[in-house]
Image (tube, coloured by chain):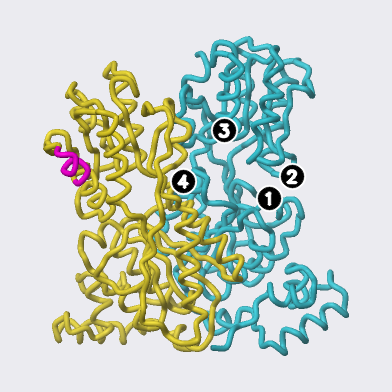
Chain colours: A cyan, B yellow
Amino acid sequence: MRRKVTLKQIAKELDISISTVSKSLRDSHEISEETRQKVQAFAKLYNYKPNNIALSLKNKKTKTIGIIIPEIVHHFFATVISGIEQVANEKGYNVIVCLSDESFDKEVINLEMLASGSTDGFIMSLSKETQQKKDFHHIEEVINQGMPVVLFDRITNDVFCDKVIIDDQQAAYDAVSFFIEKKYKNIALITTVDYVSVGKLRTEGYLKALKEHKIAAQNHLILKIEDIEHCQDSITELLQNNEIDAVFAVNELFAVTAIKTALKLGKKVPVDIAVIGFTDGIISQFSTPTITTVSQNGIKMGQKAAKILIDRLEKEEEDEQYTTEIIETNLVFRESTTT
Amino acid sequence: MRRKVTLKQIAKELDISISTVSKSLRDSHEISEETRQKVQAFAKLYNYKPNNIALSLKNKKTKTIGIIIPEIVHHFFATVISGIEQVANEKGYNVIVCLSDESFDKEVINLEMLASGSTDGFIMSLSKETQQKKDFHHIEEVINQGMPVVLFDRITNDVFCDKVIIDDQQAAYDAVSFFIEKKYKNIALITTVDYVSVGKLRTEGYLKALKEHKIAAQNHLILKIEDIEHCQDSITELLQNNEIDAVFAVNELFAVTAIKTALKLGKKVPVDIAVIGFTDGIISQFSTPTITTVSQNGIKMGQKAAKILIDRLEKEEEDEQYTTEIIETNLVFRESTTT
C-alpha cells in the first residue's frame, strides 16, 4: 500500500526541524525563501497534503474534542481528562487524547494529525519543550483555521485563546503563609526550573509570601530540579540542612520524596519538619504520613475547559472575546503538617 | 453549521440500543428485518454515513494507532500506553487514546469514530460492560474491514485476533502458594465479580493453589466486590474475622484498603496479617507499609502489543495466524509480607 509522507519524514530527509517544515508549508515569512521552496517542492513530489481531509469536511462537525497533554502517568492530567469526558459525554461529544511526551515535535505532529478532520477543537496543556522554545505557531495555525483551542494549566500568554488555570502564585502564597503563621522559621522550596510556567508561578508565590511577612529569601533553601526522575540526591543534600523546619514542594513527587528523605535522615514528619505538596493525587492520599497539599481540582478544571470549548463550538457567530477562567484551589490538611 | 447525525442520536430517536443501530446499518441478520429497514431509512433521511471518510482513504495509511481503554485514572493502563508510545514513536506511528469509561456504548462509538479514517489499527482492553454483555460485533466488524486489533489484559476468546496478556491464573497461584509455603493458615481473597475476565482468572489461581496444597477453600474467606468505589465496608466486615492471617487482593486499591482497614482494627501488617496485591503501581510503592505485589509489567505489555500490531500493519500479505503473547509476571517483595 502507498504510504503518506509525514512532516517528520520531510524534516528528516531535508535535515531541518519539524517546525521549519510546518512553517514552510504555510509559507511563513519566518523561513527563508530558499527553504520554503525546497520544502514545498519536496512535499509536492511526495504528495504531502496537509489537511486534505479537513478541506472536504469543511462544513461538517465531527462532534469530537481533541486533548493534547504532556504525559499520562500523572494523576492530575488523568483527573482533567475525566472532567472533560463528563461534560463532553453529556453534550454528545467524543474525546480523543494524544500525548506530547513533553516534546515540541510530538505536540506539532499530534495537533496537525487531529486538525486534519478528526476534531472540532482542542483542549491542551503545553509540553515542557514548547514552553522552553516559546514556539506556538502550531497552535495559532489551528486557531486561524477556525478550530478553537482551550489551554489549561501549562499555558502561555503569547496565544490568544480561552484558558483555564488555577492561580498558581496565590496557591503557593497561601501554603507558605500557612507555614509562616504557624511560626516555622526556615521554609524550604522544592520547585522545577523556571521555564515550566506553573513551577515559575509557584516559586513567585513562595517568594511573595516571604517578602510580605518580611522574611528574607535564602538561596540555599530553594532547590530547582531539572530532572524529576533523579531528584533524590539533591533533595537529600537540601534536607541535610538541619535549620529547615518546613518544606513547600511544587508537586506531589517532590513532596513524597522530601518526606521519605527526611525520615531516612532520622527526622520526624511533621514534628521536626512539616511538608506541603501540590496536586492532590493518589500519592498524597496513600503515603504515610498522608500529605497536606494544594488541591488543584483537576476534575473541575477539565469540566470548565470542556464547557468553554463546546460553548464556543456551538455558537453561531465567532466571538473574539477570550476568557481566562481561574479555578479555586484550597489546602487539604493531612498528617504531614500540624494544625 | 450542519451537524452530522450520530449513532447515539439514531438510537435515542428510535428508542433502541446503539448496538442494534450499528448492527442494522451493517444489515446484520441478528436484527429483525423491520428494525433494520427503520434504522436504515432513518440514517438515510438524516444523511448518516458510516465510514464515509474511510472509503475515500481506503488505500491510504494514517500511520496512527488507536488505543481504547476502560479508564485513565489507573496506573496500569497509563504504563501500557507509555509502552505503546515508545514502540510507536520508534516506528514513526502516532497514537490516539479514547476511553470507554467501562461502557459498552462508548466503546462502540469510539471504535466507529476511530475506524472512520483516523487509524490503521487498534490496541484495546475491553470495558466491564462489554465483558458482561459478551457482545463483540463492533470489534469483529473493524477486523473484517481490514483493520487489525490487538487485545490486551481484558480480552475475550470469542474474537479471533492477536492478544497480549499475563497469565493471571498463574500469577495469582504463585502469590497464594507463597503464603502457603510460609505457613499462613487462613488466606483471604479480595476479588472482583466474575464477569471481569482478569478477576475471574485470579480467583481461579487462588482456588488452584489451595486445592493443590490440599487446603479446602472457604466461602467466608472470599470477598467478591462489585462496586470498587465503596469496597471499604465489605473489607472491614471480612477482616473482622480474626482467623485471617493473609490477604491476596486482585488489585492495588483492594490491597491498600485491606491494609488501612487492618491497621484500623488494631492489627499489625505484616505481623498479624500479611498482604499481597496485584498491579505494581504508585500506591504499592508509596503507601506505608509498602505493598508486596504481582508486577504486571504494563510497559512491556504495551511494547509487545504495539510491536505485534505494527508488524501486522506492515506485512505485505494478510496473515490469518493470530498469536497470544504471555508477558511474564513476578512478585515484588516489600513491607506488607515477611520474607
Mark 4 or 1 closer to N-term? 4
Q: Which residue is mark 2?
A: A195
The answer for how far apart the CA atoms under marks 4 and 1 are is 20 Å
Q: Pointers 2 and 3 in contact (CB under 8 A)?
A: no
Are discs 4 and 3 located on one and the same chain? yes
Image point (74%, 40%), residue name: A194
Q: Which residue is mark 3?
A: A278
Mark 1 or 3 closer to N-term? 1
The answer for how far apart the CA atoms under marks 1 and 2 are is 8 Å
Mark 2 or 4 closer to N-term? 4
Q: Pointers 4 and 1 in contact (CB under 8 A)?
A: no
Mark 4 or 3 closer to N-term? 4
> Which segment did they paint magenta?
B208-214
Q: Identify the element where label 4 is drawn.
A: helix
Q: Pointers 2 and 4 in contact (CB under 8 A)?
A: no
Output the chain of dot 2. Answer: A
Q: Amino acid at mark 3?
A: Phe
| Quarter of the rendering occupied by the C terminus of chain B | top left
Binning the other alpha carbons within 10 Å of mark 1 as few (below 14), some (14 to 19) or many (20 upward) gives some
Q: Which residue is mark 4?
A: A79
Asked if residue B209 lies left or right of residue A113, the reply is: left
User: Which image quadrant is residue B225 in?
Assistant: top left
Q: Amino acid at mark 4?
A: Thr
Q: Main secondary structure of the magenta part?
A: helix
Q: Nearer the viewer, mark 4 or mark 1?
A: 1
Nearer-the-camera pick, B274 or B6:
B274
Q: Which residue is mark 1?
A: A128
The answer for how far apart the CA atoms under marks 2 and 4 are is 24 Å
